[in-house]
Image (cartoon, grey):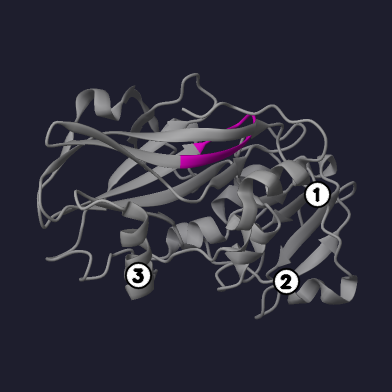
C-alpha cells in the first residue's frame, strides 16, 4: 500500500507533480476498441493475464458534480465554451484541471486469461494522496433526485435524471467481442470506503441507498468480499469488476490494483493512471445534504433551461441552488 501524503503549500503543484500527464488523458469507454485493447496488452506485460483498468463513462458519472483544487480563471465570454457533461471533451477538461468527482469515483477492471487459469484474490485501492476536500472550483450539475434531496427543490427544467434512463436507451456497458469471446460479462460490483483504516473492498449493493441515485457508504456491505470469495478466471474467459470508491471526509488520489495467483505465483498489477475523488467542502458533509456553496472560491453551474446545456458563472457566496 502506498504511503498517504499530507499536503503543504500549493495543492495544484502537488497534484501536478504526482499526476503528470494523467490529467490530459481522455477516458476509455466501455466500448473497447483496438487502440484500448492494444494499450491494455502493452501495460499488462506478461502472458498469464491481461488486465485493463478504465474509467467508467455513463450518464451518472459524467453528470455528477466535480471540484477543482484552484479557482477556475476563465473570462466570462469563454465560459460557454467549456465542455458540458455527456460530451467527449468533458472528462478530459476535468482531468486537465486536476478535478475530482464529488463523493465517489467508479472504474472498471477487466481480466482476461489466455493460457493458465488464475485466481483473483484481492482488489485494492492504493492511496497515493490524501488531503482536505477540494474547495477551489465547484462544477455544480443538478441531478434529479439527488438535487431534490440536497436542496428541497425540483430538478432544473429540461434535465433528464440518469437513474430514469432505461438500459435500452442508455450506453451499452458491454465489452467488445474481441475482449469477450462469447456473450456478455456479468460484472462483480465492489465498493471501498476510503475513510476507513485500512480500507478494504466489500460487496456493493446498488439498492441499499433507496431512491437516492448516487453511490454512498450505505451501498457498501460490511464484510470484505475477498475474505469470502475467490474468483477463478480460466483460459478464454474474462472477469469484469466494477469498483467504486467513496468518501465523506477527504480528497484522495488512488490507483487500483489487482492481486491474483497463477501457477503458485502471487502477482499484482497496478493501474497505470490514478483517479481522484473528493468530499464536499465546508459544511457539506454528506452527498444527501445541501451543498455548502460558500466554501468554494468559484462556482460554475450547469444551465439546463435551454435545449443546449451550457455553463454559467455564479457567486458561491450568494448562490442558493438555482
Q: Is residue 235 above or below residue 1?
A: below
Q: Give the numbered dot on residue 31.
A: 3
Image quadrant in which you'd find residue 135: top right
The residue drawn where x is 51% and y is 36% is 246
Q: Taking the image as drawn, is residue 215 in sight?
A: yes
Q: Quadrant of the C terminus?
A: bottom right
Where on the picture, by quarter, is residue 305? Answer: bottom right
Q: Position of residue 98 (x, y in %)?
A: 68, 52
Q: Main secondary structure of the magenta part?
A: strand
Which is nearer the eye, 101 or 316? 101
Q: Secondary structure at mark 1?
A: loop
Q: 135 or 93, which lies in front?
A: 93
* Residue found at x 75% / y 61%: 301
Residue 173 spot, x, y in % from top left: 33, 63
- Closer to the chain start, of discs 1 and 3, is 3
Residue of label 1:
70
Disc number for residue 82? 2
Circles 2 and 3: CB atoms closer than 8 Å: no
Who's the residue at 46% across and 27% down the image? 1
Task: State the extent of the magenta-drawn residues as a range.
Answer: 246-255
Q: How many angstroms separate mark 1 from mark 3 (CA)?
A: 33 Å
In this image, 9 relative to 64: left or right? right
Q: Which mark is residue 3?
A: none
Residue 247 colored magenta? yes
Q: Is residue 68 left or right of residue 190?
A: right
Residue 167 seen anywhere in this rendered image of the structure: no
Label 2 Cα neighbours within 10 Å, binned few <14 / some 14-19 / many ≥20: some
Amino acid at each position: 500500500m502506498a504511503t498517504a501524503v499530507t499536503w503543504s503549500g500549493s495543492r495544484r503543484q502537488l497534484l501536478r507533480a504526482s499526476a503528470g500527464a494523467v490529467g490530459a488523458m481522455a477516458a476509455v469507454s466501455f466500448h473497447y476498441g483496438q487502440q484500448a485493447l492494444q494499450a491494455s496488452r502493452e501495460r499488462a506485460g506478461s502472458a498469464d493475464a491481461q488486465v485493463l483498468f478504465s474509467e467508467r463513462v455513463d450518464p451518472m458519472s459524467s453528470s455528477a458534480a466535480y471540484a477543482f483544487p484552484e479557482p477556475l480563471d476563465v473570462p466570462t465570454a469563454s465560459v460557454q465554451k467549456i465542455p458540458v457533461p455527456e460530451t467527449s471533451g468533458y472528462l478530459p477538461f476535468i482531468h486537465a484541471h486536476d478535478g475530482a468527482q464529488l463523493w465517489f469515483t467508479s472504474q472498471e477492471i477487466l481480466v482476461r486469461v489466455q493460457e493458465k487459469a488464475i485466481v483473483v484474490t484481492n482488489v485494492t485501492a492504493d492511496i497515493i494522496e490524501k488531503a482536505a476536500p477540494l474547495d477551489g472550483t465547484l462544477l455544480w450539475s443538478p441531478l434529479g433526485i439527488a438535487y431534490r434531496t440536497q436542496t428541497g427543490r425540483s430538478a432544473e427544467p429540461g434535465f433528464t435524471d440518469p437513474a430514469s434512463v432505461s438500459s435500452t436507451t442508455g450506453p451499452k456497458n458491454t465489452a467488445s467481442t474481441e475482449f469477450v469471446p462469447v456473450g456478455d460479462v456479468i460484472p462483480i460490483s465492489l465498493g471501498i470506503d476510503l475513510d476507513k483504516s485500512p480500507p478494504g473492498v466489500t460487496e456493493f449493493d446498488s439498492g441499499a441507498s433507496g431512491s437516492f441515485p448516487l453511490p454512498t457508504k450505505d451501498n457498501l456491505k460490511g464484510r470484505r468480499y475477498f475474505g469470502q470469495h475467490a474468483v477463478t478466471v480460466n483460459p478464454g474467459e474474462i472477469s469484469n469488476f466494477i469498483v467504486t470508491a467513496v468518501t465523506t471526509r477527504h480528497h484522495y488520489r488512488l490507483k487500483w490494483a489487482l492481486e491474483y495467483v497463477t501457477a503458485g505465483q502471487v502477482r499484482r498489477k497496478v493501474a497505470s493512471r490514478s483517479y481522484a475523488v473528493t468530499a464536499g467542502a465546508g459544511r457539506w458533509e454528506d452527498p444527501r445534504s445541501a451543498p455548502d456553496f460558500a466554501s468554494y472560491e468559484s462556482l460554475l453551474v450547469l444551465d439546463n433551461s435551454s435545449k443546449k446545456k451550457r455553463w454559467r458563472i455564479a457567486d458561491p457566496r450568494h448562490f442558493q441552488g438555482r
